[in-house]
Image (cartoon, rainbow, N blue to C red):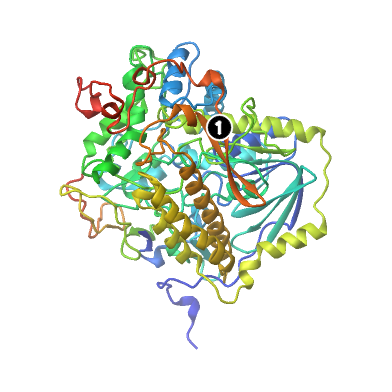
Amino acid sequence: MENKERKPVTKELPRPASVPCPYEARYETDVVVLGCGFAGLNAAVTARESGRRVLVVDKGRPGFSGLSPWPSSFRWFDPEKDDADAFRRAVLIGGDYISNMKWYEEWITDSKRIYHRLRDWGMLTPFPKPQEAGDFFERQDYAGYREAFQQLDRHEKWVEVLEKNGIPFLEYTMVTDVIVEEGRVRGVMGFHVPSGKVIAISARAVVMAMGGGCYKPSGFPAGGDTFDGEYIAYELGLPISGKEFEDSHGTSSVAPGSPFYYMNWQYLENIWPGGGDASQDNLKPFIESKVNFVVLGRARAAKNRLPASTGKEVTREAETNALRRGAALGYETDPDEIRSGKLGSPLPASDTHGGAIGMSSHLTGGVLCDLEDVSGRTGIDGLYVAGDGMHASYPGGASYPCGRGFTSCFCSIDGDHAGRAAAAFAAEATLQPLSEETVAERTEAITAPLRVERGFDPNWARDVLHGFMAPYWVTISKSEKVLEATLVQVEYMRDHVAPYLMARTSHDLRLCHEMKHKILSAEMKLRASLYRKESRGATYREDYPYRDDEHFLCYLTVNKTGEGMEIREVPVKEEWTGDREQAYEKRYLCYYPGEPEARGFHVEPPRWMGGGKKP
Amino acid sequence: MSVVRVDLSKCIGCESCVKVCPMDVFYFDHTAHKSVIAYPENCQSCGQCFVHCQGRSLGMSNDMFGFAIPAMRQTTTAPMNRVVVTEPGVLTEMTRGELP
């Protein structure tokens, strides 16, 4: 017999038949935090600092999963230097008057503290760019650059912070159920993905910081987020909002579908600090640049059937980055001011849309809480939501005119607040362990796809759903007829595909659950988009191409009822809707294609349409 | 688009790829002491495994599953390129048009 030990292994090996699970089947804790991005990590540490026992569960490894590995910037407000009123007006006007100003105010008051917290954790430490540190850039030596600055790499800090704070965490564990009994949260259940072992956690309070999702990652690395939290929340009867507002992240014709090729250096460099860039003097271009980038460029491109640029424009992209990143105004000579807006390495332009189809515009998607609330409290006792895609906090309204780097900062604040509230609730609540019956019943449901003998491959279902939802006439430039037609397809998948998704391994089991979540999410998106018969911010209807303040100064929520999905309107607080008497062309600064002509007013074309002077 | 194995003999068994992959693409063979690209069809091409690969055993390629096709183009749009990166300084079959 040949000696296999001595033979070099050069051919890809098969997947090991079994993988050991390092975790117990049952846990008990005070606060369980689901998802460990910026929101989850801050929630966990704050709850721990309040003296509670905390357990974190993440579908991947904290720091490397979900969307939190990817921000290029982090912006905060400096109360001693910045113009709060300018920032408030930017968000009020630029957010199309549906911004949650209460949450935005939390960023004004709390972001500097959160900046210092993350800086102390080592997540915001600057280090040289690849071009400054040697020939990494010329040689395209990505791995070498990462290794050279490994000690400063923020991705590693998530686990370090958890360990330093004595917070245990379960990695690669997908949560599929939040258990609520008699109006109170009791715990969560899910499974360790590599091994398939089902895990049940009894808890006094739960913070869901599980992110949003996309149907298929096609240029923006959002693939680990698959609406898991949104699905659970909907099934619990919580109102899901923001589904109609579309995410703006694109992809590049240089390497379509590959975030690595056109964003690589951005993710390997430090997170660039930003902020301090709105003032009363530059308010108009500030809003225009944000809204154009996020919203109107896309609507115009869809109407013209053209990509946003040629995809070769490296330099232009660098300039755009300078504008979008935002350097603190007039603080150039201040040695203490590090919000420099410094540029990252040149990257190809992201010229075509649809990098993460299905994702909601930042901070619009997820559970809509009471408009007076700043803790992420849901209607269920002990259950809190936080972070992008999970908590419809709307600090940037319909268009996200907040400036680049806002989401990473805001999610940290959001998580911090939710962690504090959950800890306070847990301090008073009794722990009622999950019953054996509940665990057995949920285990049966979680593992059901493994027992399907003939059914659908979840990867095939993913591609089919992506095919239905990705065309620009479904998400970017919407109309009644197309939305209705797509809804028929998605309903068919809901009724005839989702129940028959088949898993052969625990990896497949994850995919099956994810697909079920994506199909529900697509239905919510289509129904909310159909209901909003207007265009506002990041939702554009070609059959209702302008804003309709009379009927739609409201948040829409999708709710589970006995008869299926029901859309409800939640009016925006009167004081957040601006001066309703003001003429439309004064009230709004940015207009949809053709709107001035249709409404009968004249406007000078803004800079980005060829008017005025270039900066 | 996905991760590819460039040279399995270079895998030193550090398990970095298994740790950092958010898509559950990688498994580990404890007998051979090598990582396994078990589910490349679920790779989102984020490249975290590639930049963390201590033995430089992994690469990024469009050979296996192809790039996504961008919906909209114009005559000047950058062409679909064939891109395989293996190790620093050695850009096999990499043609990135006019990009640096």
Looking at the image, which is closer to me, A241 or B98?
Answer: A241
Vertical comparison of A247 with A109: above or below: below
The residue at which mark 1 appears reads as A393
Q: Secondary structure at mark 1?
A: loop
Say which residue appears at 31% left-offset and 26% top-offset: A599
The image shows residue A471 at horizontal and vertical percentages of 35, 52
Vertical comparison of A355 with A462: above or below: above
Look at label 1 and name its amino acid: Ser
The image shows residue A480 at horizontal and vertical percentages of 41, 47
Q: Quadrant of the N terminus of chain B?
A: bottom left
Q: Quadrant of the C terminus of chain B?
A: top left
Say which residue appears at 63% left-offset and 48% top-offset: A560
Residue B51 seen:
no
**Quarter residue A436 falls in:** bottom right
Vertical comparison of A244 with A598: above or below: below
Say which residue appears at 37% left-offset and 12% top-offset: A280
Q: Is residue A57 left or right of residue A261?
A: right
Q: Is residue A605 left or right of residue A426?
A: left
The image shows residue A601 at horizontal and vertical percentages of 28, 21
Chain letter behind tag 1: A
Looking at the image, which is closer to me, A6 or A33?
Answer: A33
The image shows residue A421 at horizontal and vertical percentages of 70, 30
Q: Is residue A392 left or right of residue B41?
A: right
Vertical comparison of A201 with A387: above or below: below
Q: Which residue appears farthest toward the bottom when viewing the image?
A: A1
**Quarter residue A313 falls in:** top left
Residue A514 seen:
yes
